[in-house]
């Protein structure tokens, strides 16, 4: 928002993703929308700061104004850039929602796309965490 951080990336297949996990909703008061970009195309300049928000990821923000920049995976450092960084969300189409069972009853995202529950999302991104949780049940 303030322009202190500049993020550029290339997109070859503009696909949007929405995350309804507790942390994303607490962070932005709704789902976090990211735009799939070409990983090696991302460049960042300026005071970007990453907060390690879980065992498997972190959230980046502008150190000047606090704007959300991306969510990154600890394992491989991949970044899921905020769709709001791009005009018209990069022209993307919503392809997948994560943690749909955490989505509040007050809104629903329209359209035909993949909708993954907490169990399905964790199995995809954090199977080790899911296994430790199942061991405790």
Image (spheres, rainbow, N blue to C red):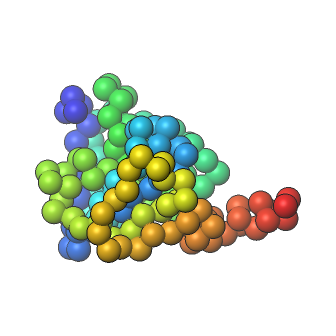
Count of picture labels: 0
Q: Nearer the viewer, residue 96 or 9?
A: 96
Say whether residue 110 is left or right of residue 51: left
Q: Is residue 4 above or below residue 136?
A: above
Q: Is residue 86 left or right of residue 46?
A: left
* Residue at x 76% of width, y 67% of height: 131
| Image-quadrant location for residue 17 | bottom left
Q: Nearer the viewer, residue 114 or 32?
A: 114
- Quadrant of the snapshot with the C terminus: bottom right
Residue 72 visible from this viewpoint: no
Query: Considering depth in this image, is 49 or 1 the residue closer to the camera?
Result: 1
x, y (%) of residue 7? 24, 47
Q: Residue furthest top?
A: 64
- Residue 39, percent across and down? 34, 65
* Extreme-right residue of the structure: 136
Picture coordinates of residue 112, whole percent (x, y): 32, 74
- Residue pictured at 50% horizontal, 61% vertical: 100
Q: Position of residue 86 (x, y in %)?
A: 19, 51
Determine if residue 90 is in view.
Answer: yes
């Amino acid at each position: 928002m303030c322009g202190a951080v500049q993020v550029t990336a290339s997109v070859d297949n503009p696909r949007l993703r929405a995350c309804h996990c507790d942390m994303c909703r607490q962070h932005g008061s709704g789902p976090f929308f990211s735009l799939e970009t070409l990983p090696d195309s991302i460049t960042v300049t300026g005071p970007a700061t990453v907060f390690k928000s879980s065992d498997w990821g972190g959230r980046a923000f502008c150190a000047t104004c606090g704007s959300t920049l991306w969510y990154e995976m600890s394992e491989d450092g991949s970044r899921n850039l905020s769709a709001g960084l791009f005009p018209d969300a990069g022209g993307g189409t919503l392809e997948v929602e994560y943690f749909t069972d955490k989505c509040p009853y007050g809104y629903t995202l329209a359209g035909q796309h993949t909708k993954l529950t907490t169990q399905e999302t964790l199995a995809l991104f954090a199977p080790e965490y899911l296994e430790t949780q199942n061991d405790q049940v």
